[in-house]
Image (cartoon, coloured by chain):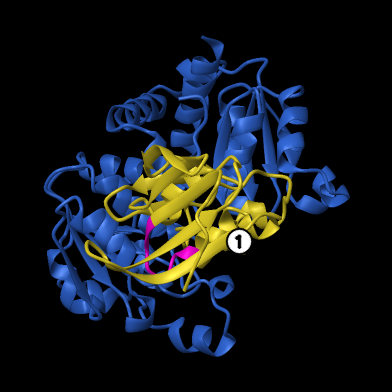
Amino acid sequence: MKSLIDILDLTTAEIDELIQTACDIIEHPQKYSESCKGKKLATLFFEPSTRTRLSFEAAMYELGGNVIGFSEANSSSAAKGESVADTAQVISCYADIIAMRHPKEGAAYVAAQNASIPVINAGDGGHCHPTQTLTDLLTIYREKGRFENLTVGLCGDLKFGRTVHSLINALSRYSGIKIVLISPEELKLPSYVKKDILQKNHIPYEQTTDLQAALPQLDILYMTRVQRERFFNEEDYLRLKDSYILEPKKLQKAKSDLCIMHPLPRVNEISVAVDKDPRACYFKQVLYGKFIRMALILKLLEEAGK
Amino acid sequence: MKIDSIQNGAVIDHITAGNAMRLYQLLGLDRLDCSVAIIKNVNSGKMGKKDMIKIDADIPLDFDVIGFVDPGATVNIIKDEQLVEKRTIQMPEKLTNVIRCKNPRCITSVEQELDQIFKLTDRENKVYRCIYCETKAGI
């Protein structure tokens, strides 16, 4: 593994290794506090994403490394018309590893093809966001202790939500997984995802529009935001954005060890009253995101050094 | 209808009926000065109907393009009016700069100097995907 562009670039053994490293970092943070001393992470954010960028930066600082970079395309040479390929080659002269966010799909792949240092895809448009999926996997592992034999409910925007597609893809490689797809008709999981991932891997799944009825069987509930930027039509967005709101009363019949996740930021799909519920894991998920990014940076720098 | 026999050139045969024009365009045959005949809806024992293209010039053909559009096609190479070689066509693993990605969100839509590369991801269903954004290619 030289770079990480797509979650499917990783074998399950490599994911397991990253999860184990992240768990070890959580248990023994001091052991890793100088692991990246003298190394530089370049955060190349061609579109703003404060959360992901700060997570990468915090991860590198906690490993004892340094961070350079930019947080929007206007403050980079892209504004002067520089190609992604050229930017990747230039930054390779300054840094040891790149975390890149770009609005165009495939941009991270182009960077990885041209950089001489590892590239981590921190999101390329609606295409891939592998560190979000790794974050989700670490959260599931830490909260449930396993990936096998889980009933996972995915709720909200299943049509445009790339985190959902990637998570389904990653979970499809484990045994005993059952998927429950909860969404309005307009935002159902695309048929190609059902065909290419769920049916191909013989993953049992059911589709429903009723969140409350689906809740009692779930081990994991993954809520998603209905994203304004994915709609071409404002009217459709306004009509659908409040379709599925999780409130304490809906959780009455849910399992006591349910794990509620959300990639954040939330708009109003999870009521703030749910935050106090011990089953709410979405803020822990943010913390796990930093730890898995630390594990990934370590792994890629180690591979690059070989 | 009479089409003269070929002196030196190639006959692309067993093209699925309806595919000849697409092949003509992707092979760049519209840019040739020699005689090129597109014969559509020829009766065929095996295929019912088929298309054919006859090219009366010894030009290099891109077999990857033919394999992408119609892997069932065959190519007969003609020299001095004699059939000297009959080639069956394979689907190529990779297509470079033959078709363009139609996804407006793909990096190739803004960085024009990038090669347009598609990879065969599902041989059974003839699915090619853009290597950058994984959008399915339309034939």
Magenta stretch: residue B17 in it? yes
Q: Position of residue A39 (x, y in %)?
A: 65, 19
* Quadrant hosting residue B70: bottom left
Above or below, A192 relative to B66? below
Q: Residue furthest top?
A: A306
- Residue at x 29%, y 30% (from the top left corner): A16
Taking the image as shown, residue A254 lies to the left or right of residue B55, namely left
Badge 1: residue crowd in 10 Å (few <14, some 14–19, many ≥20): some
Q: Which residue is mark 1?
A: B105
Task: State the residue in front, A39 or A185.
Answer: A185
Q: Which chain is yellow?
A: B
Give the blue chain's letter.
A
In the image, residue B6 lies at what x, y percent?
Answer: 52, 51
Q: Which residues are magenta?
A: B14-20
* A112 vs A274: above or below: above
Q: Amino acid at mark 1?
A: Arg
